[in-house]
Image: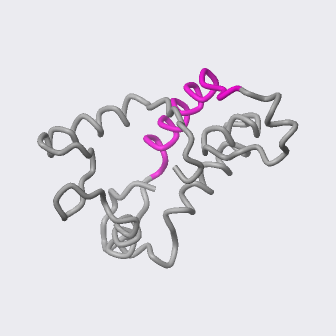
């Protein structure tokens, strides 16, 4: 975390399944997603490379995924801005407001992450990615 603060993330059931599978792939590592070098995490460029490899480098960015989530929160899920900002671990820029608003909205974020999982798992498949019709949006 850039802010060096603890950020609790309520994980959806599918996320937990993915993490369990990842842990099983690398049982001797302290890292869930280890890099290619001994005891190192994935490079920050790994996701960018994946997008490039599947032909999406000109259509998507890793940070754009956060933006897509934020837009979905506002336009589809209709959640309060404070909740989506907390989900993204954004700090409250107004110091006085931040001093009084000392909540992480954890219960609301649990429901939000569950709704995001449902949305992601039911979104229409993307076509035209190197001929694949099964690539997730």
Q: Is residue 87 above or below residue 50?
A: above
Is residue 10 or residue 118 the one in the foreground? 10
Q: Which residues are magenta?
A: 103-124
105 on left or right of 53:
right
Is residue 29 or residue 88 the one in the foreground? 29
Q: Is residue 97 above or below residue 35?
A: above
37 on left or right of 75:
left
Q: Is residue 1 visible?
A: yes
- Most common SS among magenta residues: helix
Query: Number of callouts in the render?
Result: 0
98 inside magenta stretch: no
Is residue 70 or residue 44 the one in the foreground? 44
105 inside magenta stretch: yes
Tell me what residue is drawn at x 39 percent, y 70 percent: 45
Task: Tell me residue 117's x, y (percent).
Answer: 47, 37
Tell me what residue is drawn at x 67 percent, y 42 percent: 73
Residue farthest along the top direction in this orientation: 107
| The quadrant where residue 25 appears | top left
Tell me what residue is drawn at x 70 percent, y 45 percent: 91
38 on left or right of 74:
left
Is residue 47 or residue 120 the one in the foreground? 47
Task: Tell me residue 43's x, y (percent).
Answer: 34, 65
Structure colour scheme = one colour
Task: Tell me residue 60's x, y (percent).
Answer: 51, 69
């Amino acid at each position: 975390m850039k802010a060096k603060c603890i950020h609790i993330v309520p994980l959806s059931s599918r996320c937990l399944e993915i993490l369990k599978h990842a842990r099983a792939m690398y049982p001797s590592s302290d890292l869930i997603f280890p890099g290619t070098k001994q005891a190192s995490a994935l490079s920050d460029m790994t996701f960018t490379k994946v997008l490039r490899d599947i032909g999406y480098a000109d259509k998507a960015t890793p940070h754009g995924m956060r933006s897509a989530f934020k837009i979905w929160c506002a336009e589809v899920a209709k959640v309060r801005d404070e909740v989506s900002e907390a989900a993204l671990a954004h700090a409250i820029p107004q110091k006085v407001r931040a001093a009084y608003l000392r909540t992480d909205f954890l219960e609301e974020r649990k429901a939000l992450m569950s709704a995001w999982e449902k949305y992601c798992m039911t979104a229409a498949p993307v076509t035209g990615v190197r001929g694949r019709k099964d690539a997730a949006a």
